[in-house]
Image (tube, rainbow, N blue to C red):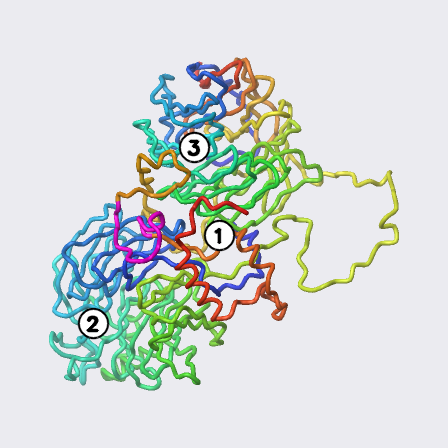
């Protein structure tokens, strides 16, 4: 769908709460839809991960085995495997259908904070409090590369759409772009002020990166030119690593959580806030958009402990 | 390519050092898939293996219980669905790549030295085979029937050669291997014969359409087109590699030839094909090493056709010569002292892969030193010292004119986050065809007792148990890659040392051959100490 020159005057259809998924015993750290949209996964400080059905909100599977809380998770492209990143310094690979632990990837020397598969799903990338980014071979579990990525904990890692680049962000205030095949640093993005960067991800076409910083700001950068193109504010984000994502199924939006317990939706081009989703009772730390349907999933911290699914249906 | 805008242009486009080597039994021949994401290798025991070139691990094994003889050549179909392997037991085996299963097997009368699938379709029905001592032939993969191609001009007539099963059509005894290759879309076959003639053949009619005489009239040993189809390389017995420009249109070469043919009725057979030949190929360059007078082996083009490489055919040395297309020798890569068996340039990256007599596959890549300005963008890399001239007011305090952050960005401008640009390197992709770029990676389950240990090693469920090498278990189970400098951090340590500053463009002096050999030896012996969980010091 080509993006219109100006967003049409048709009214934005608000999202409403559809399902409330409770079950986790401690704060949620991450929620993600699978690429085919059939599954929703959640990770928690209670050391477990779960998969849920997005259509009826039923619990499908639980993944137990980590010794400490989980900070992030990711689906492989075919949704057969789930990777989780934990404070127990390991990344673990789970069989989605059976819930069994397939592999444990060890090597990080501190909490593993973020994880993602490449689109081919033959490689995994993880970021840690040990300030490194590691690339792993999914098949053998071998660590392929250790990137001396940052000088503070690494808060997010993401592959671009063809798996050739990795972007990483850190509390050291920097975002770095890496060549995925050689592990060499291609670019560092730095602004005059360098507040801790809490989140980063590539845009769907891999040309831009969405960067969240702990000064209550999201920015969309063109990393080739090193300049930012859009700024999104109005939410609260100065303590936690809150994730954000692009919503492209029905118009173009940026969606993120916030420390005022709401979910914010901004129009991509105009940067206006079009909706604040309320309902959580603690910081909304993670959001994910369904790949094909107009559906948002969110997860919140310890006072709340729920995963919520929001849709545009009446 | 997506990351083209931020890649450092100072890096040269050809490899310089051995980056890694792959081991899995004794490999004999190799072939990249179209995008260079997978590397197929044929082994001495008759099996084939597909490497995931990104992770340098084994993606799939093609185990063949019927074939116990060494694989002589291996070839991918255009979009990666099929692999054709020829073996020393005279067999040709066609594999379904995704399933990892044999589709069919044919036995020929002679050992095929080279077999190439028709390059124009994703599920080819024919292949071109060069047997060890008879004329090249087209083999129908469904029926197994063979059609011998002419290797010589007929004495008279209209250019049609009588099909001959047992000997060359010029009557000579069949003992010289003949080179042959398809053009880019497979409508024509180019055959190089023992008299140094290139015959351009319409293989559907078994008709010689044109002929070109290679200077020197020496036996042609190899023929290969560049990936774009614009250049043809011949490797002759007179120790010279020649590059020809393909003058025919890339897509409908045969049609253009037929049109030329019909316009030249007044010429007799031989004159006609020679005239047509001159409209097909024109000699562009010749390469040779006039000092060592070395014979060449496995010559080929780089992915973009800008470079030509050839291996030295001399025993006991593993030397790869790199020329630019203009004919200048730019580099000689020297590996450990084992003969070179096969050579391939990655379709996209400046990476070369060579196979040694011992069956190891060496990966040659650029000798990259970290681009420091990528880490701190306000730093600039200098080639030499520059005198810094202070401003008069450099250290003055000027509180009013403290740098005001002016955003020169108009945030109302449209940003397109969805459109993806076509990859120019693969502009000949037929988007309706699904291409196999990678094989699904299933994590090998950890053995139960290893779940708690701090080693991410592979299970004992061996897909391959063939490494007779001194290398460790954890590296050995799925075949492995041994890294010489696996992490950029290790690269950092090395780069601090020995910079002579001699050459201005290179950032680091290439280690001497002796050092490199010692490094490879060291890597082979010390790989037992390399664990994936090696942390930074």
Q: Are marks 1 and 2 on the same chain?
A: no
Secondary structure at numbered mark 3: strand
Residue A314, by quadrant, is top left
Q: Are marks 1 and 3 on the same chain?
A: yes
Mark 3 to mark 2 CA distance (whole Å)? 52 Å
Badge 1 crowding class, 10 Å Cα cut-off, few under 14, some 14 to 19, many 20 or more, is some
Secondary structure at numbered mark 1: loop
Q: Is residue A172 visible?
A: yes
Identify which residue, B195 or B50, lies in the foreground. Answer: B50
- Report if the CB atoms under discs 3 and 2 are less than 8 Å apart: no
Mark 1 to mark 2 CA distance (whole Å)? 41 Å
Closer to viewer: mark 1 or mark 2: 1
- Give percent across and percent down for residue B441: 33, 42
Please give the label number shown on residue A182. Answer: 1
Identify which residue, A266 or B495, lies in the foreground. Answer: B495
Q: Which residue is label 2 attached to?
A: B136
Q: Is residue A227 left or right of residue B494?
A: right
Please give the label number shown on residue A74. Answer: 3
Mark 1 to mark 3 CA distance (whole Å)? 23 Å
Identify which residue, B135 or B316, lies in the foreground. Answer: B316
Answer whether residue B464 is magenta in the image: yes
Residue B251, by quadrant, is bottom left
- Give percent across and percent down for residue B379: 68, 52
- Give percent across and percent down for residue B308: 42, 70
Q: Residue at x 18, y 51 (%)?
A: B102
Identify which residue, A142 or B192, lies in the foreground. Answer: A142
- Report if the CB atoms under discs 1 and 3 are less than 8 Å apart: no
Q: Residue at x 35, y 61 (%)?
A: B361
The stretch of residues the image draws in magenta is: B462-479
Q: Residue at x 49, y 76 (%)?
A: B328
- Give percent across and percent down for residue A261: 57, 17
Closer to viewer: mark 3 or mark 2: 3
């Amino acid at each position: 769908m080509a993006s219109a020159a100006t967003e049409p005057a048709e009214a934005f259809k608000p999202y409403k709460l559809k399902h409330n998924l409770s079950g986790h015993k401690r704060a949620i750290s991450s929620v993600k839809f699978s690429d085919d949209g059939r599954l929703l996964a959640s990770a928690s400080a209670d050391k477990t991960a779960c998969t849920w059905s997005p259509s009826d909100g039923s619990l499908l599977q639980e993944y137990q085995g980590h010794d400490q809380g989980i900070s992030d998770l990711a689906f492989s492209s075919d949704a057969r495997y789930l990777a989780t990143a934990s404070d127990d310094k390991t990344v673990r690979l789970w069989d989605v259908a059976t819930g069994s632990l397939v592999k444990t990837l060890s090597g990080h020397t501190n909490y593993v904070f973020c994880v993602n598969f490449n689109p081919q799903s033959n490689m995994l990338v993880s970021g840690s409090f040990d300030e490194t980014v590691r690339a792993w071979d999914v098949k053998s579990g071998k660590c392929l590369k250790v990137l001396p990525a940052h000088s503070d904990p690494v808060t997010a890692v993401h592959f671009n759409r063809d798996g050739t680049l990795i972007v990483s962000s850190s509390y050291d205030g920097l975002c770095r772009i890496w060549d995925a095949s050689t592990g060499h640093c291609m670019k560092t993005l730095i602004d005059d002020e360098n507040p801790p960067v809490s989140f980063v991800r590539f845009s769907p076409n891999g040309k831009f990166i969405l960067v969240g910083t702990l000064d209550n700001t999201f920015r969309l950068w063109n990393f080739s030119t090193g300049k930012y193109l859009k700024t999104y504010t109005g939410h609260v984000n100065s303590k936690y690593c809150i994730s954000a994502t692009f919503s492209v199924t029905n118009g173009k939006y940026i969606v993120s959580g916030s420390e005022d317990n709401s979910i914010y939706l901004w129009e991509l081009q105009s940067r206006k806030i079009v909706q604040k989703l309320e309902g959580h009772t603690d910081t909304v730390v993670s959001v994910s958009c369904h790949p094909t349907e107009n559906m948002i999933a969110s997860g919140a911290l310890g006072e709340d402990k729920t995963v919520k699914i929001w849709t545009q249906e009446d | 390519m997506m990351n083209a805008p931020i890649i450092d242009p100072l890096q040269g486009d050809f490899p310089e050092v051995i980056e890694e080597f792959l081991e899995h039994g004794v490999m004999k021949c190799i072939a990249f898939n179209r995008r260079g994401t997978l590397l197929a290798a044929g082994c001495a025991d008759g099996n084939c293996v597909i490497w995931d070139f990104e992770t340098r691990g084994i993606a799939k094994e093609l185990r063949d219980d019927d074939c116990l003889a060494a694989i002589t050549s291996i070839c991918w179909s255009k979009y990666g669905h099929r692999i054709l392997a020829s073996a020393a037991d005279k067999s040709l085996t066609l594999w379904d790549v995704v399933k990892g299963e044999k589709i069919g097997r044919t036995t020929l009368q002679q050992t095929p030295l080279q077999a190439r699938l028709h390059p124009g379709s994703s599920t080819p029905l024919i292949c071109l085979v060069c047997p060890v001592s008879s004329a090249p032939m087209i083999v129908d993969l469904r029926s197994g029937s063979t059609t011998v191609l002419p290797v010589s001009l007929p004495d008279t007539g209209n250019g049609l050669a009588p099909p001959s099963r047992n000997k060359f059509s010029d009557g000579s005894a069949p003992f010289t291997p003949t080179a042959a290759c398809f053009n880019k879309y497979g409508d024509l076959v180019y055959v190089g014969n023992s008299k140094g003639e290139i015959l351009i053949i319409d293989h559907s009619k078994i008709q010689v359409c044109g002929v070109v005489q290679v200077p020197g009239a020496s036996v042609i040993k190899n023929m290969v087109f560049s990936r774009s189809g614009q250049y043809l390389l011949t490797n002759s017995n007179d120790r010279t590699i020649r590059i020809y420009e393909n003058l025919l249109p890339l897509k409908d070469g045969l049609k253009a030839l037929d049109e030329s043919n019909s316009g030249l009725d007044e010429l007799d057979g031989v004159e006609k094909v020679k005239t047509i030949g001159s409209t097909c190929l024109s000699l562009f360059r010749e390469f040779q090493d006039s000092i060592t007078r070395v014979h060449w082996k496995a010559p080929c083009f780089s992915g973009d056709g800008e470079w030509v490489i050839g291996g030295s055919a001399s025993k006991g040395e593993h030397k790869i010569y790199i020329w630019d297309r203009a004919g200048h020798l730019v580099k000689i890569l020297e590996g450990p002292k084992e003969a070179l068996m096969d050579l391939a340039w990655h379709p996209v990256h400046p990476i070369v892969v060579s196979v040694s007599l011992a069956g190891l596959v060496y990966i040659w890549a650029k000798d990259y030193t970290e681009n420091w300005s990528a880490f701190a963008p306000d730093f600039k890399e200098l080639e030499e010292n520059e005198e810094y001239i202070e401003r008069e007011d450099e250290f003055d305090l000027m509180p009013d004119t403290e740098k005001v952050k002016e955003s020169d960005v108009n945030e109302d401008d449209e940003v397109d986050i969805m459109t993806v640009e076509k990859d120019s390197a693969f502009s000949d992709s037929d988007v309706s065809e699904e291409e196999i770029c990678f094989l699904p990676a299933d994590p090998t389950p950890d053995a139960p007792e290893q779940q708690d240990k701090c080693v991410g090693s592979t299970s004992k469920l061996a897909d391959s148990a063939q490494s007779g090498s001194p290398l460790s278990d954890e590296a050995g189970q799925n075949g492995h890659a041994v890294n010489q400098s696996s992490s950029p951090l290790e690269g950092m340590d090395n780069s601090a040392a020995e910079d002579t500053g001699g050459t201005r463009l290179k950032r680091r002096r290439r280690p001497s051959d002796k050092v490199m050999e010692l490094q490879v030896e060291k890597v082979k012996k010390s790989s037992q100490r390399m664990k994936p969980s090696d942390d930074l010091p």
